[in-house]
Image (cartoon, helix red, strand yellow):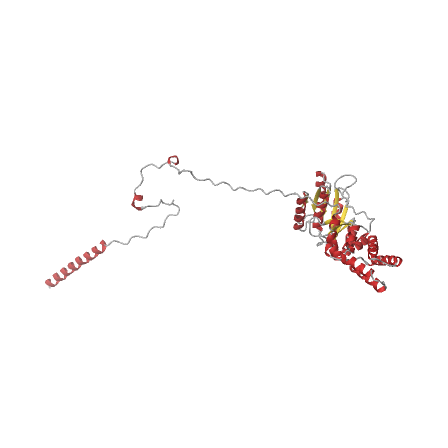
Amino acid sequence: MEILILAVVIAVVVLGALGGLVIGSRRKKSLPPPPPAAPDITAPPAEPHVGDEAETPRDEPRRTIEEVDLPDGSVAVEEPPVVEELPPTEIEIPEPTAGRLVRLRARLSRSQSALGQGLLALLSREHLDDETWEEIEDILLTADVGVQPTQELVDGLRERVKVLGTRTPDELRGLLREELLKLVGTDFDRTVKTEPETSKPGIVMVVGVNGTGKTTTTGKLARVLVADGRSVVLGAADTFRAAAADQLQTWGERVGAYTVRGPEGGDPASVAFDAVKEGKEMGIDVVLIDTAGRLHTKTGLMDELGKVKRVVEKHAPLDEVLLVLDATTGQNGLVQARVFAEVVDITGIVLTKLDGTAKGGIVVAVQRELGVPVKLVGLGEGADDLAPFEPEAFVDALIGE
């Protein structure tokens, strides 16, 4: 029994010794390294290491900036860009206006002579019966001469031909020329009034609907005045179209005319007032005021045009109110003329696009409608194609050579 107990004790001791050895060997094994700590983003960045030398701290003092040798030439300093100044706008010298329509007569006659040549061909017939006279009336009406002026011309021609009897081509041409001159009128004062009796400047307001070439005409009129030795200020009172003010200013710069303009959509009357004020202060000869292209169906806009006129006249009375009409619009142009004449006192007419149509009779019709003369005509797209109206040159262009 005792022997059995002793054996059990020995076995327990042996097992305990073996367990201690196992545990000891396990404790000697190295534990896995802990995960690297997250970098401190607030700390300043460490200097880069290059090989093992970086681990050895540098004991020698750092060199100052004065001790560092710079390479020859140092650091090149970039020169600022050179800004080229744009040359000033070259001032143009417009073509003299005296005789300008005569010089442009060939251009006018190319499109207008259909009227004159058609009349001469009919008048040259051996027998002028009622049917021939009706054809003559049709030609005149097609040329927009108007019903009443047409009847007057036909009556005059019938009487003259009856008295004349036999007719040579030269006699017919002279006869037709005389009768057309009566219609066009040679007793009108067609001078553009720009010289007030009291004090400068002369004030000219330009009106008309959109599309008639009103702003362009205002710019060309400035050239006409400059060519005649006058100084000009332009008032861009068409504030509803920024392009109109830009266009007018470009026209002015070409001949050295100063342009007064306001904010887009601003008060046109205010711009017109300022333009006249500037003209007075600068001692300018003429102020040209370009107004917005009023549609004659819009009563409110037409009333505003009347306001522009009233405001300008606080400085001085208007010397001219020029109505710009498109010669190709015919009877519609006469409707526009009537409405504008009710709002402002029209003193003269400018007919544009007269070179592009055979309807030169509009000159007669519009003068009859308003009782005021055609003073200027536009004969093309060129800068100097606006000419003072000369009845003799115009009629000569109508009947051709």
Return the residue found at the far right. Answer: 163
Q: Report the number of discs.
A: 0
Coordinates of residue 372 in the picture (x, y in percent): 80, 50
> From the viewer's perspective, is residue 223 above or below residue 22?
above
Q: Nearer the viewer, residue 22 or 218?
A: 218
Judge whether residue 214 can be spotted in this image. Answer: yes
Q: Nearer the viewer, residue 237 or 269?
A: 237
Q: Residue drawn 17% across and 60% down?
A: 15
> From the viewer's perspective, is residue 10 above or below residue 60?
below
Looking at the rendering, which quadrant does residue 401 occupy? bottom right
Q: Nearer the viewer, residue 132 or 332?
A: 132
Coordinates of residue 201 in the picture (x, y in percent): 74, 41
Q: Quadrant of the N terminus?
A: bottom left
Q: Is residue 354 left or right of residue 7?
A: right
Coordinates of residue 225 in the picture (x, y in percent): 73, 44
Q: Residue drawn 17% across and 58% down?
A: 18
Judge whether residue 296 can be spotted in this image. Answer: no
Coordinates of residue 337 in the picture (x, y in percent): 77, 54
